Image (tube, rainbow, N blue to C red):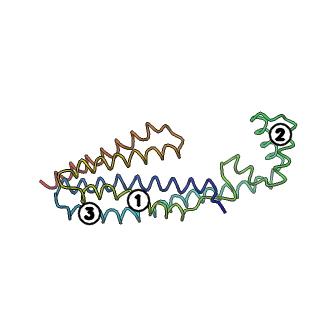
Amino acid sequence: MDMHISRKINILRAIVMGANDGIISIAGVVFGVFGASMSTWAILIAGLTATIAGTFSMATGEYVSVNAQLDSERAAKVHQQRVLAEDFAGEKAFLTANYIDEGITPVRAQALATEVMAHDALKETLALRYGIDADNLISPMQAAVASMIAFPLGAILPMVGMTVISAHYRVVATIIFVVIALILTGYFSAKFGDAPAKQSVLRNVIAGLFTMAVTYGVGLLVGM
């Protein structure tokens, strides 16, 4: 059976956010260590340690936050069940008015509301009032697993740039890798959030470059 669109969006959001956090966080760590020490081994150990910690932190954080949202959805579902039990006619009138606002004639809206309320009153009113699909509530575990996978994937590029590329080119290569990755995650996050892609990409890239610059500066001070 195909996964419902709401769950797909939840997983895709977790993937994009996890990858984006992995890129920026680990880029900041490796640049900070590079500023303090040119040692490839030190950069690698710091990057790996931060990646492991960030992976589990992101996964548990996602699990907790999505669970909070799930609790809200469940509470809304219980509340709407109670409302339907106490004022079924009022909810039917609400549906009818909504259909009329959408351009349906009053007679057809009344008939459609009667049909819908008889078939699945809870699902329709819950979706209309809260934007929640009663049969497909979000999954905290799916979001946590998606973040757990995405974070280290995002961390790979800055790690490769600072540990595998030749010392003469590693800074430039890492910046290029990170900027490309941030452009992609910024673009996809904008698409999921139905926001302007240009602003999201620009904000993402600036945040990443700023993070790298600050941590590199801190690393220089520590390494003096």
Q: Position of residue 116 (x, y in %)?
A: 81, 49
Callout 3 crowding tier (Cα within 10 Å): few <14, some 14–19, many ≥20: some
Residue under label 3, please give it: 46
Q: Secondary structure at mark 1?
A: helix
Residue contact between numbered discs 1 and 3, judged by CB atoms under 8 Å: no
Q: Position of residue 140 (x, y in %)?
A: 55, 62
Residue at the image point whose x is 26% and y is 56% from the top: 30
| Nearer to us in this view, 70 or 31 | 31
| Nearer to us in this view, 210 or 11 | 11
Instruction: Name which of mark 1 and mark 3 comes first in the sequence.
Output: 3
Residue under label 1, please give it: 151
* Identity of the residue furthest to the left in this view: 224
Q: Position of residue 67 (x, y in %)?
A: 55, 61
Q: Secondary structure at mark 3?
A: helix
Determine which of the numbered discs, if any, sits on residue 109 in the image: 2
C-alpha gap between disc 1 and disc 3: 16 Å
Q: Position of residue 131 (x, y in %)?
A: 65, 48
| Nearer to us in this view, 30 or 125 | 30
Lateral position of residue 189 relative to residue 203, left or right: right
Lateral position of residue 94 relative to residue 32, left or right: right
Amino acid tagged 1? Phe
Above or below residue 93? Residue 70 is below
Instruction: Name which of mark 3 and mark 2 comes first in the sequence.
Output: 3
